[in-house]
Amino acid sequence: MLRLRSAAAPLVLLSLFGCGGGSAASGDPASAEVAAAAGRLEGEWLLVDFRPKQTLEPMLAALLQAQLNQLTITLHDGTLTAQGIGISAERSYKLTYAAADGFSAQLIDPTNVAYTVSGGFQGIELAFTSETDPWRGTGRLKRVR
């Protein structure tokens, strides 16, 4: 199994979008929104689409293509676990903002580099935008459970 290095770590990022949350402070609407979004993100997701903002180098493009409809992302209690073809990775995540059906989040790799993602719930799918190179682009995850 390939262990993702920092340069490949955003593939995990684009796979989710991952966000975690803490408990909502009583009476704090912003904290309540973050907690609600964190709860909605909990579970298992499948990467169904990703469109990079710029053309990926051939090796990364092939890696991405192999992951579509194969890479699963499990989000639980601030930890994102990704399993795909030749990929096994774990990252921490946290929500930085949430309102209605949208959110912003950061994934933190083992070297403490943060990758920014924003997204929105659309039924059983999660549309997301990866805002950090080299995986800038848009995609969709589908809830598995």
Image (cartoon, helix red, strand yellow):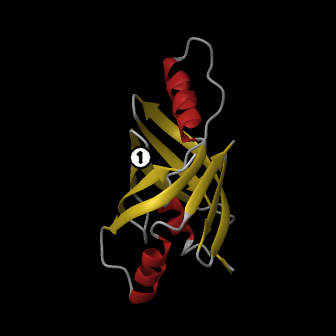
The image quarter containing residue 19 is top right
What is the quadrant of the N terminus in the image? bottom right
Q: Quadrant of the C terminus?
A: top right
**Quadrant position of residue 123:** top left
Q: Front-most of 102 and 104?
A: 102
Q: Position of residue 10 (x, y in %)?
A: 51, 66
- Residue at 38 percent across and 63 percent down: it is 49
In this view, 29 is above or below 92: above
User: Vertical placement of 85 versus 43: above or below?
Assistant: below
- Residue at image coords 42%, 47%: 126
Give the residue pinned by disc 1. 125
How packed is label 1: few (under 14 Cα within 10 Å), some, or many (20 or more)?
some
Residue 99 lies left or right of residue 143; in this view the side is: left
Most extreme residue toward the bottom is 58
Q: Inspect the image, locate mark 1, and give the three-letter code of the amino acid beneath it.
A: Glu
- In the rendered image, the residue lying farthest to the left is 54
Q: Residue at 40% of width from left, 58% of height from top?
A: 131
For label 1, the SS is strand
Q: Is residue 143 above or below residue 89?
A: above
Residue 91: give x, y in percent of width and height. 65, 58
Count of residue discs: 1
Residue 93: x and y in percent read 61, 49
Side of 88 where 52 appears, left or right:
left
x, y percentage for residue 135? 42, 68
Q: Quadrant of residue 22?
A: top right
Q: Write the residue at 57% across / 69% down.
A: 9
